[in-house]
Amino acid sequence: MIYIPAGTLRAGTPEGKMPRVATEELPGTLMQMGAYYIDLFPYPNEPGAIPQPNVSRDEAKKMCEEKGKRLCTELEWERACKGPDNTTYEYGDAYRASACLTGQSAELSSRKPCGERPGCRSGFGVLEMHGGAWEWTDSNWGRGTHDPNLGVLRGGNAEAGEIVGRCANAIGRPVGKKQPTFGFRCLSLIHISEPTRPY
């Protein structure tokens, strides 16, 4: 696992900075976050392993709990991706499709073994948060609707790589939905306080 120190997350994308999906992300809101550990790779968190597909959010939560961990909140995921400098992409502020192999359909990329994209690394050292399967978080989709049946997934891949490959990007899907392109990543808490819920 990778240690993420306590610090400040600039959640979402500031107004005026592009690309930005205004209806689906915060406007660069500063959030104080506690420290935690996050898995280096998507579950099962092993180099060379294909990420676990076809899981609902509850199944992902259970599999993390069986390892003595839990799912990330979407803000914990975003901080691990943006690194200490709050970059747009895990590797910096300028889009580079080759770093995470973004710009492809998730169907084509989600079955690739972990460890094949060493350049897809956040400033904290977390690997391959984009370019593969979408990752369930333990957060509900609170943009425009507060439907508790919609959960948040982060990461992933799509042909619109410059937009989807951003650390601030997210999609909302029914929490019971399973797809070959849906995986997850686990986290281990080492702090007491939880970050404020912004959505």
Image (spheres, helix red, strand yellow):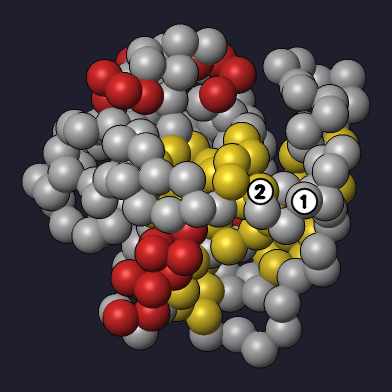
Q: Which residue is at a point 44% across and 33% down the rendered structure image?
A: 156
In the displayed structure, would residue 152 be above or below residue 193?
A: above
Q: Position of residue 7 (x, y in %)?
A: 69, 65
The 10 Å Cα crowd at callout 1, few under 14, some 14 to 19, many 20 or more, is few
Secondary structure category for the residue under label 1: loop
The amino acid at mark 2 is: Leu
Provide residue 181's location: percent of width, then percent of height. 35, 35
Residue 17 relative to residue 75: left or right? right
State how many labels appear. Answer: 2
Gap between marks 1 and 2 measured at Cα: 6 Å
- What residue did someone put label 2 on? 150
Instruction: Find residue 70 and report its horizontal and vertical position in percent.
Output: 46, 74
User: Can residue 84 be seen at all in this image of the molecule?
Assistant: no
The one of 84 and 153 positioned closer to us in this rendering: 153
User: In the displayed structure, would residue 112 be above or below residue 114?
Assistant: above
Depth order, front residue of 36/83: 36
Q: Is residue 38 above or below residue 168?
A: below
Q: Secondary structure at mark 2?
A: strand
Q: Residue at x 56, y 69 (%)?
A: 5
**Residue at image x 75%, y 70%?**
195
Residue under numbered circle 1: 147
Q: Is residue 93 left or right of residue 9?
A: left
Mark 1 vs 2: CB contact within 8 A: yes
Name the amino acid, label 1: Asp
Q: Is residue 152 above or below residue 159?
A: below
